[in-house]
Image (tube, helix red, strand yellow):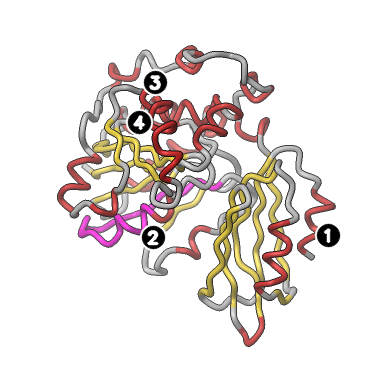
Amino acid sequence: MINTYIISGFLGAGKTTFIQHLLTFNLGKVMLLENEFGEVGVDADFFDNSLAIKEINNGCICCSLQGDFAKALDEIAAYDIDTLLIEPSGVGKLSEIIPLLINHSDFRLLSHACIVNVMTAIKYHKNYKEFFDDQVIAANVLILSHSDVAKDKVGDAVKMLQYLNDEALIIEDPYALKKSELLDVLVSNVCACPECFKDVDMESLNILDHEHHHHHHHHHDGDEVFDALAFKTKRIYDEDELTGIFKDLDEDIIRVKGYVLSHDNKTLYFNYILNEYHLFAGPQKDEGLIVIIGSHLDHAKLEALFK
């Protein structure tokens, strides 16, 4: 059987960074199954080129795509691998992914973890309950990110997470743990059997007050709530220009990620989430790729802003 770890988390939680950390461990022959919300995936460019990546890019792993996800699992089962790491879409529902793994005879589900960004946790719990809360409720371990730069937000975030899921182990600094310690944490309190999740349904998302429920709560599929824009460009950018663009983005923009061509034959990679962004030089590309995720996106305005 293939040992399987699900590393979930809402948009911009830090899943890729955590998975990169896991890949430094000796987990045998590893495959990463990514699911990218939007028309194209860019995360493959953030990983070592030797890693086998299978992407599903036409939506999020949720009810409408369970057939696709199940097919992907059947294909992966034929590979000679020891470990499967699954990075669901930031707007995927963990509770709907787990049953597909625990009912598949070729996979052994060892962990269904959720990465939580303490800087955005409260806001996302209020505004995107149907997706954020589902990931937290269905996790066996909750791993905090950005707690080192937002220590003042850790207490409130932990209190909210414990209210949603008082059985999950909460880890504030996973990178301080040794390999054996982190792997032990990931598999702690795991319930890898169908009966363990029979009570995880939509009603469980209503355990908190309803005063902050937006129209998102009444939708089921990620693409009914979120909008994604992706486009390629050969335009040359510099860091100051990108910084100015990020500062001008509306609050409805949740995530921007990708890479663009820069001067001196360089390629600039970037991650943006809620007014926080990171720029760095990466592998050279022939053209840029920009993916924008948010709600009620003005596609024409955004394309003009970047182009």
Residue with the most extreme front position? 152
Q: How far apart are the alpha carbons under marks 3 and 1? A: 43 Å
Report helix, strand or loop for mark 4: loop
Neighbour tally class for label 4: few under 14, some 14-19, many 20 plus, Cα within 10 Å: many
The amino acid on which the numbered mark 2 sits, given as a three-letter code, is Ala
Residue found at x 59% / y 81%: 266
Neighbour tally class for label 3: few under 14, some 14-19, many 20 plus, Cα within 10 Å: few
**Image spot of residue 286 (x, y percent):** 63, 77
Q: Which residue in the structure is indicated by mark 1?
A: 304
Circle nearer the N terminus (3, 1): 3
The stretch drawn in magenta includes residue 28: yes
* Residue 171 position by quadrant: top left
Magenta span of residues:
18-36
Circle nearer the N terminus (1, 2): 2
Q: Which residue in the structure is indicated by mark 3?
A: 163
Q: Which residue in the structure is indicated by mark 4?
A: 139
The amino acid on which the numbered mark 4 sits, given as a three-letter code, is Ala
Q: Nearer the viewer, mark 3 or mark 4?
A: 3
